[in-house]
């Protein structure tokens, strides 16, 4: 059984088509054809056919997820920068106390790389969670 649509749904589809036209996704002819389909639609399938192959509008959930991922990424960057400063200070202190050595030039870059990878990997898992 097809779900019937009302004026509100048809108007919403028409506004969505107008937005896609303003954003350059539709030509004037395509807009006219799709508007005619949308405004004459009696059920959801006909309405969806007017909007086919067009990206859906962002929902609040999409915006929230994007903001959360940006915050996680920014937090990861801050922690990584603080970690880099701490490793640099430790490296300089090590060199000042013990003098330059092969151990210092091998160990500190490996510790830095391993910790940076772990931090990035952990933030990726947090971003992937929904």
Image (cartoon, helix red, strand yellow):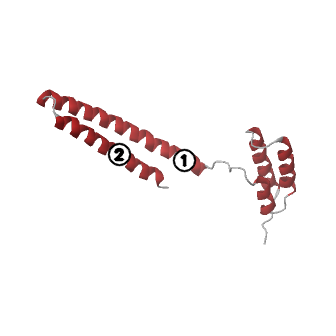
Can you tell which quarter of the image residue 52 is in?
bottom right
Residue 83 appears left or right of 103:
right
Instruction: Single out the residue that lies furthest toward the top.
Output: 96
Packing grade of label 2 (10 A; few <14, some 14-19, many >=20) is: few
Q: Residue at x 75, y 39 (%)?
A: 24
Residue 19 appears left or right of 94:
right
**Quarter of the rendering occupied by the N terminus:** bottom right
Between marks 1 and 2 in the image, the one whose residue lies nearer the viewer = 2
Marks 1 and 2 close (CB-CB < 8 Å): no
Q: Secondary structure at mark 2?
A: helix
Disc 2 marks which residue?
117
Can you tell which quarter of the image residue 18 is in?
top right
Does 116 sit above or below residue 88? below
Q: Secondary structure at mark 1?
A: helix
Residue 98 in picture, x, y percent from top left = 12, 31
Q: Compare marks 1 and 2 and give the one earlier in the sequence.
A: 1
Can you tell which quarter of the image residue 83 is in?
top left
Mark identifier at residue 93: none
Packing grade of label 1 (10 A; few <14, some 14-19, many >=20) is: few
Disc 1 marks which residue?
64
Does 28 sit above or below residue 41? above
- Give 2 or 85, whichever is nearer the viewer: 85
Q: Residue at x 19, y 35 (%)?
A: 104
The answer for how far apart the CA atoms under marks 1 and 2 are is 26 Å
Residue 15 appears left or right of 102:
right
Instruction: Single out the residue that lies furthest toward the front.
Output: 102
Residue 26 in picture, x, y percent from top left = 78, 43
Does 74 sit above or below residue 13? above
Residue 31 in picture, x, y percent from top left = 83, 45
Report the number of numbered marks. Answer: 2
Residue 68 in picture, x, y percent from top left = 49, 46
């Amino acid at each position: 059984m097809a779900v019937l649509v009302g004026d509100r749904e048809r108007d919403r589809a028409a506004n969505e088509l107008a937005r896609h036209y303003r954003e350059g996704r539709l030509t004037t002819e395509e807009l006219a054809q799709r508007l005619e389909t949308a405004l004459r639609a009696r059920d959801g399938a006909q309405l969806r056919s007017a909007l086919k192959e067009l990206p859906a509008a962002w929902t609040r959930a999409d915006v929230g997820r994007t903001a959360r991922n940006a915050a996680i990424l920014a937090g990861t960057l801050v922690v990584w920068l603080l970690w880099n400063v701490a490793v640099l200070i430790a490296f300089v202190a090590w060199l000042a106390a013990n003098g330059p050595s092969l151990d210092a030039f091998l160990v500190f870059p490996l510790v830095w790389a391993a910790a940076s990878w772990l931090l990035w990997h952990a933030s990726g898992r947090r971003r992937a969670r929904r």
